[in-house]
Image: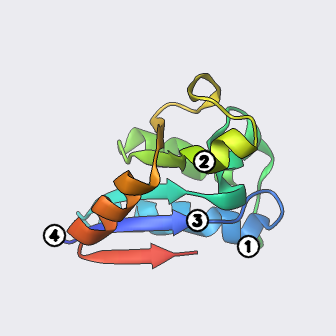
């Protein structure tokens, strides 16, 4: 089993790129790997309750469904704290399974994981 941190930086501004980290996280988990999703930049908006309901990438499963599968698989969703503050998102706004994390958490996770995938 490998360990992955899968990072996404795109939000509703690019539905296809916004969806890909969740597609990758689901696939990695299905293959038995340990996965964390890191949302930063505009992607932090995807951690807000209700946002995923309106995101569908080109030829991809709607993000609402993928998010539900990621949550059901207990894949942690980390939301960049500085990015969230800039977009007025707090912990109470987040979907189940998401938490606010800082850059030290991200760096520690990248250093301790086998692979880092960035979208």
Whichever of callouts 4 and 3 sits on the residue coming sooner in the sequence is 4
**Contact (Cβ within 8 Å) of mark 3 with mark 1:** no
Q: Position of residue 1 (x, y in %)?
A: 15, 69
Q: Between residues 91 and 3, which one lies in front from this camera angle?
A: 91
**Image depth: mark 1 or mark 2 in front:** 2
In the image, what residue occupies the spot 47% across and 37% down? 99
Q: Position of residue 65 (x, y in %)?
A: 61, 47
Residue at numbered disc 4: 1
Whichever of callouts 3 and 1 sits on the residue coming sooner in the sequence is 3
Disc number for residue 59: 1
**Contact (Cβ within 8 Å) of mark 1 with mark 2:** no
Cα separation, mark 4 vs mark 3, equals 22 Å
Residue at numbered disc 3: 8
Q: Secondary structure at mark 2?
A: helix
Residue at numbered disc 2: 82
Whichever of callouts 2 and 4 sits on the residue coming sooner in the sequence is 4
User: How is the structure coloured here?
Assistant: rainbow
Residue count near mark 2 (Cα–Cα under 10 Å), binned few <14, some 14–19, many ≥20: some
In the image, what residue occupies the spot 60% across and 47% down? 82
């Amino acid at each position: 089993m490998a360990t992955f941190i899968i990072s996404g930086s795109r939000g509703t501004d690019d539905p296809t790129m916004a969806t890909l980290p969740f597609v990758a996280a689901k696939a990695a988990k299905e293959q038995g790997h340990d996965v964390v999703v890191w949302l930063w930049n505009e992607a932090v908006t995807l951690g807000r309750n209700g946002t995923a309901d309106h995101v569908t990438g080109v030829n991809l499963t709607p993000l609402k469904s993928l998010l539900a599968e990621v949550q059901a698989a207990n894949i942690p969703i980390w939301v960049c704290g500085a990015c969230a503050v800039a977009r007025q998102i707090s912990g109470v706004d987040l979907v189940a399974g998401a938490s606010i994390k800082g850059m030290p958490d991200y760096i520690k996770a990248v250093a301790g994981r086998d692979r880092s995938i960035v979208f």
